[in-house]
Structures are given as structure tokens and as C-alpha cells.
Amino acid sequence: MLLPTKTYKTDGDNTTKRFSMSSQNRFNATRRILRGFPAQFKFRTAEDINRYFSGDRIQCLLCGKWYVMLGKHILNIHGVTVDQYKKKYGLPWGRGLVAKDTETKMSENCKRRMAAGEINFGPDHISKEKLSASWKTKRPVCSAHRRAAVKRGTAAIIKWNEEHPAKPKHVPEKSKRVIATEIYRARDKKVAELKQQNKTAKEIADALNVRVTTVKRSLKRSGLSKPRSEIVSESEDIKKTVISLYLKGFKQKNIAKTINRSLCRTQQIIGEYRQKESNAKPSK
């Protein structure tokens, strides 16, 4: 026989759902926190971490209860994400919040599916041994793993579009940004290599078929561009050279070739000099 019921209305419509008191008690039990929790400590050694993950269940350090997996529990019950939980208790980033026995079953299932050809990670897959090399793996390794996965997924979409032109799939904008970032990094590396060969920005731009401003921005990101003071001093030296050649009677085209600058820049320097001289002359 059911105990007196407790009712509540749903958000979507006016229907009423009824729960028995036993169901309500079970619902409240999931939110009960045991004595001594949440735990106020951090794991310091790999042995303690391995001991925590061993067994057929894993204990939630926020409420003290035991579960096979903690991901959904800590998010739905405690409102804490997996990353926040790992940071709070010093757990490694590259290890899931799963008990050892469950992890073994999932691994065997994954290997079986890989052997059957249902799953193919490709050559860019980062193995579990590489992630577990350090018990406190840093986030950049996971980011590299994620970028590789995005790259493989985009390649699969492109291949699908080539094989099925009638049903093309859309490449997400996030995937495009990840691939574009890899292209920019490869281009910055080529720009740095050409800069070490004492080539100018114009020569690098012609070699890579890009604009000069793109090369200058790449050099600035790589820290290979000249400092502001050095650029200003070189500009002053160029102005002095142009004016001295102009006073000696050289033509403007020959001056531009001598200083390896454009004719427009040479005319600009000479025009500024003429304006300055005309302003310096006393008016009659």
C-alpha cells in the first residue's frame, strides 16, 4: 500500500505527476551528504590516486557515497563539473572518474570494436600510455588530443562530401578555426626560417605568396621584428642619405634605387625637406 502522495506541476503544461513517499525518500536520499563530507584534502601521490580508483566502485568525495561513475552524479546532484572536481582534489586531467572494474570493461569493449573495424582513431591518436606518463597530466596534452580529433573529423566530413555530393555535410566553424590555427602556425614557422636566412619581409612575402603586412605580423608574433627605437633610427639615417644625395644633384629615381626604397618614399622625404627649407626662409 502506498503512503500519502506528494504532487507538483510540471513546467510545460498543467498535468500533475504523483510520487509515493517512498519514491520521494529515495529522491531525497540521493542528495543526502554523509558525515565527514565533503572531504577537505588533495591527493599528493600516484599511489593514493591509484588506490582511489581501484575496486568496483568509486567514492564521491563531496557526499561520501559510492558509484560506478561520478561524472553525471557530481554534475546533477552537486552542480560541479568534472574539471572542477579534479582541480579541487588534485586528480589527473587525463584520467576519467570511473572505477577500475568499469574502466577495464570499457577498455575491452573498445578494443573489441577496434578489432572489428567499428572504431578507427587514425595515426594522430594519442595513446593512453602517453597520457598516463605523468599522473598529473597538464591540460595542453588534452587540447592537442582534442585538436587532432577535430582534424580527423573534418577530414572524414570532406571525404564524405567527395563520395556523396548529393548529401553534403557541413564542416563546423570550430573545426575550421582549429585547422586555420594549424595553418597559421605552420606559416609562422616558415617565416621564421626565412628570416634566419637574412631575407627581407618583401622577399619572404614573395616566397610564401602572401602580403608584406602578413609577414610583418608573423614576425611580430614570433618576436623577430625589430624594436621601435631601431626602426626610428634607421628611418632617420635613410632621410639623411636621401637629402645628401639630393643636394649633390642625384635624380630621385637613382636615389630610390640607392637606398632600396620606393620612389614614392623618396619623393615624400624630399618634399618634407623642401617644405622645411621654405618655412625657414625669412619672409620679405
Image (tube, rainbow, N blue to C red):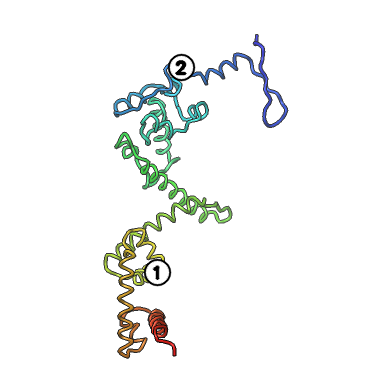
Establish if 130 lies above or below 160: above
Q: Residue 10 at what x, y percent from top left?
A: 67, 27
Left or right side of 269 for 78 = right
Establish if 233 lies above or below 14: below
Q: Quadrant of residue 86?
A: top left
Most extreme residue toward the left is: 197
Q: Residue 284 at what x, y percent from top left?
A: 44, 90
Which comes before the other along the chain, label 2 or label 1? 2
Amino acid type indicated by mark 2 = Leu
Most extreme residue toward the top is: 1
Q: Label 1 crowding class (10 Å Cα cut-off): few <14, some 14-19, many 20+?
A: some
Q: Quadrant of residue 41?
A: top left
Q: Which residue is mark 2?
A: 34
* 259 and 248: which is toward the camera: 248
Most extreme residue toward the right is: 14
Q: Residue 230 at what x, y percent from top left?
A: 30, 67
Dot 1 falls on a residue whose secondary structure is: helix
Q: Which residue is mark 1?
A: 212
Amino acid type indicated by mark 1 = Val
Q: Residue 7 at what x, y percent from top left?
A: 67, 20
